[in-house]
Image (tube, helix red, strand yellow):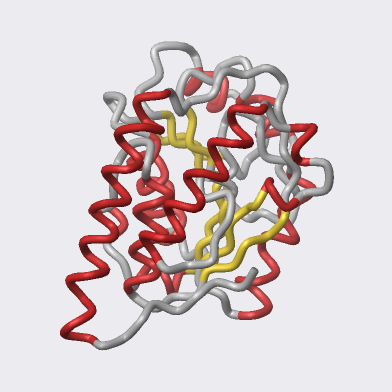
Amino acid sequence: MVPAYREAERIGRVLARIPALVDSVFVVDDGSDDDTAEVAGAHPDPRVRVHRHDSNRGVGAAIATGYRLAFESGADVAVVMAGDDQMDPRDLIALLAPVCEDGVAYAKGNRLAWPGARRRMPTLRFVGNHVLSWLTRLATGLRVHDSQCGYTALSARAARAMDLEALWPRYGYPNDLLGTLAARSLEVRDVPVRPVYAGEPSGIGWRHALLVIPFVLARVLGRRLSLRPSSGRAPSHASD
Protein backbone atom coordinates (compact mmCIF):
# COMPACT_ATOMS: atom_id res chain seq x y z
CA MET A 1 0.00 0.00 0.00
CA VAL A 2 1.03 3.61 -0.55
CA PRO A 3 0.22 6.02 2.31
CA ALA A 4 0.47 9.58 1.02
CA TYR A 5 0.00 13.12 2.26
CA ARG A 6 0.69 16.13 0.03
CA GLU A 7 2.65 13.98 -2.46
CA ALA A 8 1.13 15.15 -5.75
CA GLU A 9 4.59 15.78 -7.20
CA ARG A 10 5.99 12.34 -6.33
CA ILE A 11 3.08 9.89 -6.23
CA GLY A 12 3.09 9.29 -10.00
CA ARG A 13 6.75 8.25 -9.97
CA VAL A 14 6.16 5.95 -7.01
CA LEU A 15 3.26 4.20 -8.74
CA ALA A 16 5.15 3.89 -12.02
CA ARG A 17 8.00 2.04 -10.30
CA ILE A 18 5.99 -0.56 -8.39
CA PRO A 19 7.13 -4.00 -9.63
CA ALA A 20 4.89 -6.30 -11.64
CA LEU A 21 4.96 -8.95 -8.90
CA VAL A 22 2.58 -6.77 -6.81
CA ASP A 23 -1.06 -7.80 -7.32
CA SER A 24 -2.87 -4.71 -6.00
CA VAL A 25 -1.83 -1.18 -5.07
CA PHE A 26 -3.89 0.70 -2.49
CA VAL A 27 -3.13 4.41 -2.29
CA VAL A 28 -4.39 5.95 0.96
CA ASP A 29 -4.50 9.73 0.65
CA ASP A 30 -4.54 11.03 4.21
CA GLY A 31 -6.66 14.11 3.64
CA SER A 32 -4.18 15.95 1.41
CA ASP A 33 -4.99 19.53 0.44
CA ASP A 34 -3.24 19.14 -2.92
CA ASP A 35 -3.90 16.89 -5.93
CA THR A 36 -2.40 13.70 -4.48
CA ALA A 37 -5.63 11.68 -4.80
CA GLU A 38 -6.39 13.03 -8.28
CA VAL A 39 -2.91 12.26 -9.61
CA ALA A 40 -3.03 8.75 -8.14
CA GLY A 41 -6.53 8.17 -9.47
CA ALA A 42 -5.47 9.18 -12.98
CA HIS A 43 -2.58 6.72 -13.06
CA PRO A 44 -3.05 4.20 -15.89
CA ASP A 45 -2.00 1.13 -13.87
CA PRO A 46 -5.20 -0.96 -13.37
CA ARG A 47 -3.83 -2.31 -10.07
CA VAL A 48 -4.11 1.13 -8.45
CA ARG A 49 -7.08 1.87 -6.20
CA VAL A 50 -7.37 5.14 -4.29
CA HIS A 51 -8.94 5.59 -0.87
CA ARG A 52 -9.13 9.07 0.61
CA HIS A 53 -9.46 10.07 4.27
CA ASP A 54 -11.83 13.01 4.72
CA SER A 55 -9.33 14.63 7.09
CA ASN A 56 -5.68 14.22 7.99
CA ARG A 57 -5.60 11.39 10.55
CA GLY A 58 -1.88 10.70 10.57
CA VAL A 59 0.53 8.36 8.82
CA GLY A 60 -0.24 5.51 11.22
CA ALA A 61 -3.95 5.77 10.53
CA ALA A 62 -3.28 5.81 6.77
CA ILE A 63 -1.17 2.66 7.06
CA ALA A 64 -3.85 0.95 9.18
CA THR A 65 -6.43 1.77 6.48
CA GLY A 66 -4.11 0.37 3.82
CA TYR A 67 -3.65 -2.84 5.77
CA ARG A 68 -7.41 -3.21 6.16
CA LEU A 69 -8.01 -2.71 2.44
CA ALA A 70 -5.20 -5.07 1.45
CA PHE A 71 -6.18 -7.93 3.73
CA GLU A 72 -9.89 -7.55 3.00
CA SER A 73 -8.98 -8.01 -0.67
CA GLY A 74 -7.33 -11.34 0.16
CA ALA A 75 -3.65 -10.33 0.28
CA ASP A 76 -1.26 -12.72 2.03
CA VAL A 77 1.32 -9.98 2.60
CA ALA A 78 0.99 -6.19 2.65
CA VAL A 79 3.98 -3.97 1.91
CA VAL A 80 4.23 -0.29 2.77
CA MET A 81 5.89 1.81 0.06
CA ALA A 82 5.28 5.44 0.99
CA GLY A 83 4.30 8.16 -1.44
CA ASP A 84 7.43 10.25 -0.81
CA ASP A 85 9.55 8.13 -3.22
CA GLN A 86 12.14 7.29 -0.53
CA MET A 87 11.75 3.50 -0.84
CA ASP A 88 13.58 1.73 -3.66
CA PRO A 89 11.46 -0.90 -5.47
CA ARG A 90 14.61 -2.95 -6.07
CA ASP A 91 14.58 -3.87 -2.38
CA LEU A 92 11.03 -5.26 -2.46
CA ILE A 93 11.96 -8.89 -3.15
CA ALA A 94 14.48 -8.94 -0.30
CA LEU A 95 11.88 -7.43 2.03
CA LEU A 96 9.27 -10.04 1.06
CA ALA A 97 11.60 -13.03 1.40
CA PRO A 98 11.51 -13.42 5.21
CA VAL A 99 7.70 -13.26 5.24
CA CYS A 100 6.97 -15.37 2.15
CA GLU A 101 9.78 -17.93 2.47
CA ASP A 102 10.56 -18.11 6.21
CA GLY A 103 7.15 -17.38 7.72
CA VAL A 104 8.32 -14.27 9.58
CA ALA A 105 5.44 -12.09 10.77
CA TYR A 106 6.98 -8.70 9.95
CA ALA A 107 9.99 -7.67 7.91
CA LYS A 108 11.25 -4.11 8.13
CA GLY A 109 13.83 -2.12 6.25
CA ASN A 110 17.13 -1.24 7.86
CA ARG A 111 18.82 1.64 6.04
CA LEU A 112 21.55 1.81 8.66
CA ALA A 113 22.87 -1.61 7.56
CA TRP A 114 23.20 -0.63 3.90
CA PRO A 115 26.85 -0.19 2.78
CA GLY A 116 27.76 3.49 2.84
CA ALA A 117 24.61 4.50 4.76
CA ARG A 118 26.55 7.06 6.77
CA ARG A 119 27.45 8.94 3.59
CA ARG A 120 23.98 8.65 2.05
CA MET A 121 21.90 9.73 5.04
CA PRO A 122 21.80 13.29 6.43
CA THR A 123 23.78 13.41 9.67
CA LEU A 124 20.87 14.33 11.93
CA ARG A 125 18.72 11.53 10.52
CA PHE A 126 21.54 9.00 10.81
CA VAL A 127 22.25 9.87 14.44
CA GLY A 128 18.57 10.29 15.33
CA ASN A 129 17.68 6.88 13.90
CA HIS A 130 20.41 5.25 15.97
CA VAL A 131 19.12 6.89 19.15
CA LEU A 132 15.46 6.09 18.50
CA SER A 133 16.35 2.52 17.52
CA TRP A 134 18.23 2.07 20.79
CA LEU A 135 15.24 3.35 22.74
CA THR A 136 12.95 1.05 20.75
CA ARG A 137 15.14 -1.96 21.57
CA LEU A 138 14.93 -1.08 25.26
CA ALA A 139 11.16 -0.67 25.17
CA THR A 140 10.30 -3.72 23.05
CA GLY A 141 13.05 -6.21 23.79
CA LEU A 142 13.50 -6.69 20.04
CA ARG A 143 16.92 -6.51 18.41
CA VAL A 144 15.78 -4.04 15.76
CA HIS A 145 17.71 -1.29 14.03
CA ASP A 146 16.44 1.73 12.09
CA SER A 147 13.14 1.57 13.95
CA GLN A 148 11.71 4.54 12.02
CA CYS A 149 12.08 2.97 8.58
CA GLY A 150 8.61 2.63 7.08
CA TYR A 151 9.51 0.17 4.31
CA THR A 152 7.87 -2.96 5.74
CA ALA A 153 6.06 -6.21 4.95
CA LEU A 154 3.34 -7.61 7.25
CA SER A 155 1.78 -11.07 6.92
CA ALA A 156 -1.98 -11.58 7.01
CA ARG A 157 -1.45 -14.03 9.87
CA ALA A 158 0.23 -11.37 11.98
CA ALA A 159 -2.42 -8.80 11.07
CA ARG A 160 -5.15 -11.11 12.37
CA ALA A 161 -3.36 -11.32 15.73
CA MET A 162 -3.43 -7.55 16.29
CA ASP A 163 -5.88 -4.68 16.43
CA LEU A 164 -4.16 -2.46 13.88
CA GLU A 165 -6.77 0.28 14.22
CA ALA A 166 -5.90 0.66 17.92
CA LEU A 167 -2.24 1.51 17.27
CA TRP A 168 -0.79 5.01 17.52
CA PRO A 169 -2.20 6.92 14.51
CA ARG A 170 0.58 9.41 13.80
CA TYR A 171 4.38 9.51 13.87
CA GLY A 172 5.44 6.86 16.35
CA TYR A 173 3.26 4.23 14.68
CA PRO A 174 6.25 1.97 13.74
CA ASN A 175 7.39 1.91 17.37
CA ASP A 176 3.92 1.06 18.66
CA LEU A 177 3.53 -1.67 16.03
CA LEU A 178 6.89 -3.18 16.98
CA GLY A 179 5.81 -3.20 20.62
CA THR A 180 2.58 -4.96 19.73
CA LEU A 181 4.39 -7.57 17.66
CA ALA A 182 6.79 -8.20 20.55
CA ALA A 183 3.95 -8.53 23.07
CA ARG A 184 2.40 -11.24 20.89
CA SER A 185 5.73 -13.05 20.38
CA LEU A 186 5.59 -12.48 16.62
CA GLU A 187 8.93 -12.58 14.85
CA VAL A 188 10.40 -9.40 13.37
CA ARG A 189 13.35 -9.35 11.00
CA ASP A 190 15.51 -6.49 9.75
CA VAL A 191 16.33 -6.38 6.03
CA PRO A 192 19.00 -4.00 4.65
CA VAL A 193 17.46 -1.48 2.23
CA ARG A 194 18.87 1.46 0.33
CA PRO A 195 18.73 4.89 1.97
CA VAL A 196 17.02 7.20 -0.55
CA TYR A 197 17.24 10.96 -0.03
CA ALA A 198 16.91 13.83 -2.49
CA GLY A 199 16.74 16.81 -0.15
CA GLU A 200 13.21 16.18 1.10
CA PRO A 201 12.48 17.56 4.58
CA SER A 202 12.02 14.91 7.23
CA GLY A 203 8.47 14.26 8.38
CA ILE A 204 9.80 13.72 11.90
CA GLY A 205 10.46 17.07 13.57
CA TRP A 206 12.07 17.74 16.92
CA ARG A 207 8.71 17.53 18.69
CA HIS A 208 8.12 14.03 17.34
CA ALA A 209 11.65 12.87 18.14
CA LEU A 210 11.86 14.36 21.62
CA LEU A 211 8.27 14.08 22.83
CA VAL A 212 5.91 11.95 20.76
CA ILE A 213 8.07 8.91 20.04
CA PRO A 214 9.46 8.68 23.62
CA PHE A 215 5.85 8.87 24.87
CA VAL A 216 4.84 6.04 22.53
CA LEU A 217 7.83 3.97 23.66
CA ALA A 218 6.98 4.59 27.31
CA ARG A 219 3.50 3.27 26.55
CA VAL A 220 5.01 0.22 24.84
CA LEU A 221 7.31 -0.45 27.79
CA GLY A 222 4.43 -0.07 30.23
CA ARG A 223 2.40 -2.66 28.33
CA ARG A 224 5.38 -5.00 28.19
CA LEU A 225 6.04 -4.76 31.93
CA SER A 226 2.38 -5.22 32.79
CA LEU A 227 2.29 -8.49 30.81
CA ARG A 228 5.31 -10.04 32.49
CA PRO A 229 3.83 -11.21 35.82
CA SER A 230 0.80 -12.90 34.25
CA SER A 231 2.36 -14.42 31.15
CA GLY A 232 5.88 -15.14 32.27
CA ARG A 233 6.86 -14.99 28.62
CA ALA A 234 9.45 -12.76 27.04
CA PRO A 235 8.84 -11.45 23.54
CA SER A 236 10.52 -13.28 20.71
CA HIS A 237 13.60 -11.49 19.47
CA ALA A 238 14.33 -10.40 15.96
CA SER A 239 17.20 -11.67 13.91
CA ASP A 240 20.09 -9.28 13.39
Which residue is at 64% across, 80% downward? Answer: 102
Residue 184: horizontal and vertical position, in percent?
34, 75
Question: In the current view of this chain or complex, which residue is farthest to the right?
Answer: 115
Question: In the current view of this chain or complex, which residue is farthest to the bottom?
Answer: 232
Q: In the image, 99: left or right of 138?
A: right
Which residue is at 63% across, 53% downward? Answer: 109
Residue 153: horizontal and vertical position, in percent?
56, 59
- Is 217 located above or below residue 138 in the figure? above
Which residue is at 58% across, 23% downward? Answer: 42
Q: In the image, 83: left or right of 97?
A: left
Which residue is at 68% across, 47% downward? Answer: 112
Counting the numbered discs, the total is 0
- Is 135 located above or below residue 34 in the figure? below
Quadrant in the picture for the C terminus: bottom right
- Is 238 located above or below residue 149 in the figure? below
* The quarter of the displayed image where residue 123 is located: top right
Q: In the image, 19: left or right of 47?
A: right
Residue 130: horizontal and vertical position, in percent?
57, 45
Q: In the image, 43: left or right of 165?
A: right
- Is 8 located above or below residue 218 in the figure? above
Along the line of sight, the residue nearer the viewer: 180 or 214: 214
Residue 59: horizontal and vertical position, in percent?
40, 36
Along the line of sight, the residue nearer the viewer: 230 or 91: 230
Along the line of sight, the residue nearer the viewer: 162 or 54: 162
* The quarter of the displayed image where residue 208 is located: top left
